[in-house]
Amino acid sequence: MGMLSERPLSFDLHCHLDLYPNPLEAFQEAEKNRIFTITVTTTPKAWPQNRLWAQGLQYVHPALGLHPQLVASRASELGLFFTYLPEARFIGEVGLDRSEAYKSSYDVQYRVFDEILKGCQRIGGKILTIHSLQAVNDVLTLLDRNLRHSNCVRILHWFTGTPSEAKKAVELGCFFSFNSKMLKTDKGKTLLELLPNDRLLLETDGPFVKVGGKPAHPMDTVQIISEMAKYKQLSPERMQEILIANLLRIL
Ligand code: MN
């Protein structure tokens, strides 16, 4: 991989460190703890500052994003997204959201996400963290159409689809990142049980997900590994080994 000098302790492939009160401190804490972190952004305008915060860090990497929930007001930044796309290896948060509050912008979201995937396909080698709330079927259709013959890695973040949608996503080569909130629901536990071990990854989705009343931090993924181990009937050490191997395989 050539990117890390020491094996990471854990990893968080979807958190929003730029939304913490002190982002630079949050970046440096993840680095110090050797938690490999993809810190997603919600608008292309955030990219330059996030790159600066990550400068010189091995374990913390910003992702270029255009959040589907912001597309209604930020679709005009799509041009800026393509300006930065060649220099971004990690892409997110991107995707579709058809929940009540965002469905009025769904047609625009669909066009924007389609364009983003086409851009990723053209350049290749991207790692994407994807939002699919109440829109799993369309997300999978667009991934299949645009990235089927691509080497881009597709990670479904906080997946809430049905078991049959999950199976379809597995067939399309998708990975799934789990957070602590998912493991508190029957749906999340069922998903974890049905997925093959080699598709499992980790996330916190902090600061939106809270742990003990406080915004989740990348370090909290260590606890998620133990919980996942329980449901997969593995030792925490074995679970950690499987998850880190999955991380190293996609990097
Ligand atoms: Mn998020």
Image (cartoon, rainbow, N blue to C red):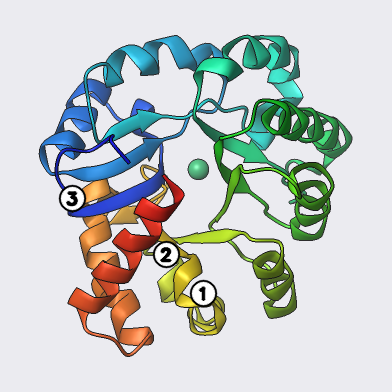
Marking on residue 181: 2
For residue 32, side relative to residue 228 (left or right): left
Is 226 on the left or on the right of 176, as rendered?
A: left
Q: Nearer the viewer, mark 1 or mark 2?
A: 1
Residue at image x 60%, y 19%? 85
Q: Earlier in the sequence, mark 3 or mark 2?
A: 3
Q: Position of residue 169 (x, y in %)?
A: 69, 65
Along the viewing direction, whichever of 51 and 8 lies nearer the viewer: 8
- Determine whether, in the image, residue 174 is placed left or right of residue 118: left
- Which amino acid, by three-letter code, is at mark 2? Lys
Residue 108 at least partly seen = yes
Residue 84 image position (x, y, % from top left): 57, 13
Between 32 and 187, the residue placed more toward the observer is 32
Mark 1 or mark 2: name the one nearer the start of the chain.
Answer: 2
In front: label 3 or label 2: 3
Residue shown at 43%/10% (left/top)? 48
Residue in the foreground of this view, choosing between 136 and 236: 236
**Furthest residue toward front:** 2
Q: What residue would you read off at disc 3?
A: 7
Measure how far apart labels 1 and 3 are at the Cα level.
28 Å
Q: Tell which of 182 and 117 is nearer to you.
A: 117
Find out whether the residues at labels 1 and 2 contact each other: C-beta distance under 8 Å. yes
For numbered disc 1, what is the local secondary structure?
helix
